[in-house]
Image: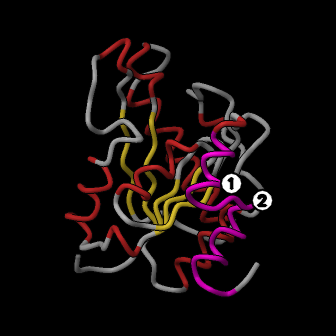
Amino acid sequence: MSGRRAAFVDRDGTLMHDFHFTDSPADVVLIPGAGRALGRLNAAGIPVILVTNQSGIARGFFTMADYERVNARLETLLEADGGRLDATYVCPHHPDFSGPCACRKPGTLLFEQAAAAHDLDLAASLYVGDRFRDIEPGLALGGTGILVPTDETPPDDVANARARAAVVRTLDEAVARFLGTGA
């Protein structure tokens, strides 16, 4: 593949606390250091692409407009903390409510769309999140998957990541590993 390497990041549990089906900008709480970690990628010239599953839309818990308001608040907080997103991709589906789709992680469609739109090399890119499904697309596409578990990450996800990818404590550690700068 040609193109630039990128960092694909999950949203809930990776950049902001996961309060499950966040529908209000007032509920956005940035994970400490998330913006600074993205800022390191920004400074290195690496595009930062958010890819998120938002099944709350398909379930009727919130609308796409609600999602966009929450995401705008997230972007404001990230910028205040020193980092920025270069693009955002969202899957609003859930197989039980809207049927199967190719964009829901661990599907690779959104990553492939981002690569085409931004001239990215998927095999040279970072895939980071708090669930195995967040990093699994990277493994399928030949990239670097790094799990940053939270208290809610299933033990099987951690075990799968330890066996097939990498596990670190913070987003900053994942970025340091990807940049080759140490923790």
Residue corresponding to mark 2: 169
> Viewer-proximal residue, 130 or 70?
130
| Residue type (three-letter) at the residue carrying disc 2 | Arg
Circle 2 packing at 10 Å, graded few (<14), some (14-19), many (20+), is few
| Residue type (three-letter) at the residue carrying disc 1 | Val
Most common SS among magenta residues: helix
> Viewer-proximal residue, 80 or 11?
11
**Is residue 32 left or right of 178 when viewed as pictured?**
right
Q: Residue furthest front?
A: 163
How is the rendered protein coloured? secondary structure
Q: Quadrant of the C terminus?
A: bottom right
Q: Quadrant of the N terminus?
A: bottom left
Tell me which corner region of the image, top left, top right, bottom left or bottom right, holds residue 114: bottom left
Q: Is residue 169 shown in magenta?
A: yes
Alpha-carbon distance for marks 1 and 2? 6 Å
Residue corresponding to mark 1: 148
Residue pictured at 29% horizontal, 72% vertical: 120
